[in-house]
Amino acid sequence: VGSSEYRGDLATSAYKRLLGAAPDPATKQFLVGLLTSGGSDETMVASVAGSDAYFQRAHASNDGFLTALYCDAVYRPIDQPTQNADDAALGSGTTRTQLAAALTASSEYLGHDVGEYYLRFLRHAGSAANLNFWIAAIKGGGSDEKMIASLLSSDEYYKEFNPSVAVVTTLTAQGTVHTSIGQNSTLKLTVLRFLGKHASAVTPPRTRTVGVVDFGLHKKGRVTLQWNRKVGGKRLGRGSYVALLRAYHKRKLISVSDALPFTVR
């Protein structure tokens, strides 16, 4: 999340959200440079919102700008007292970028951002304590990227996509798979082929994904799958392979087998 690739995607996403189109190369480079030099995500968003392009899209008027800014930033109409104060500030020399920066630094704006990160990465809403903690952290000099990195490296995130092996699964030389599932699940077998020599203590194995075999929905309990060792309608050629059986309940991955090595002679 500190890479140029991530920053480029972030800048493009913010520009598209506020202006409805991707930035030209020079504008994207400017926004990425802003982030690279230590600018926050919020500063970058404020830079876009304070631009002439955004002002023109908001009907080139201060009231139009403020109306658009509040809808885009905090998803609500601006209230009348705030509009009066902001209109006065603009009339006395405060720039549109400065107003946008004040809004994107607010707890209201950061609360939306933090909440969206929880939904995006952990698939659930953050608690009030979660939101308040990260809002305070970002206001205190932290960054969105530090928060994202914390979520992505958490045990909760890992377990969401890498559930522990719940039962022993076996695969015979003839292609019969034996396993058990705790609830009705869709079973899918991912088949990979070893390339070159197998792994050593210092060299990881090189594999290529051959494909996925979908065995469909099965009821909970012990399950026996008869597999003809074909993937995508094609029989596997000679060589060494490994398979992983995954179980999904309503599209959520709930269990995965140990690696199941086998050889086709």
Image: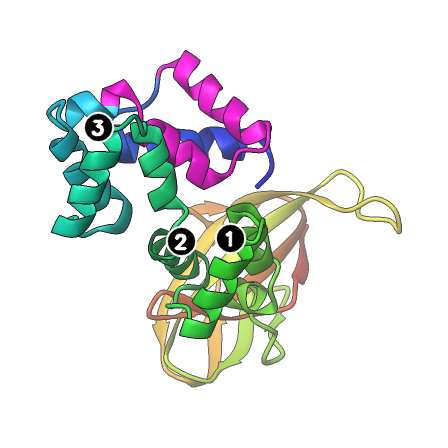
Residue 51 in magenta stretch: yes
Query: How far, Cα to Cα, is label 3 from label 2?
Result: 27 Å
Q: Is residue 127 visible?
A: no
Query: How far, Cα to Cα, is label 3 from label 1?
Result: 28 Å
Which quadrant is the N terminus positioned in? top right
Report the residue that reaches farthest toward the front.
Answer: 92
Where is residue 138 shown, x and y percent of the image?
52, 53
Q: How is the image coloured?
A: rainbow
Q: Which residue is mark 2?
A: 110
Q: Please name the residue shown 14% across and 22% down the image.
A: 60
Q: Which residue is mark 3?
A: 91
Under circle 2, the secondary element is: helix
| Numbered range of the magenta stretch | 24-53
Q: Nearer the viewer, residue 238 or 177?
A: 177
Majority SS type along the magenta span: helix
Direction from residue 92 to residue 259 in the image, left or right:
right
Q: Nearer the viewer, residue 123 or 58?
A: 58
Q: Amino acid at mark 2?
A: Leu
Where is residue 211 shown, x and y percent of the image?
49, 47
Q: Is residue 239 above or below residue 17?
A: below
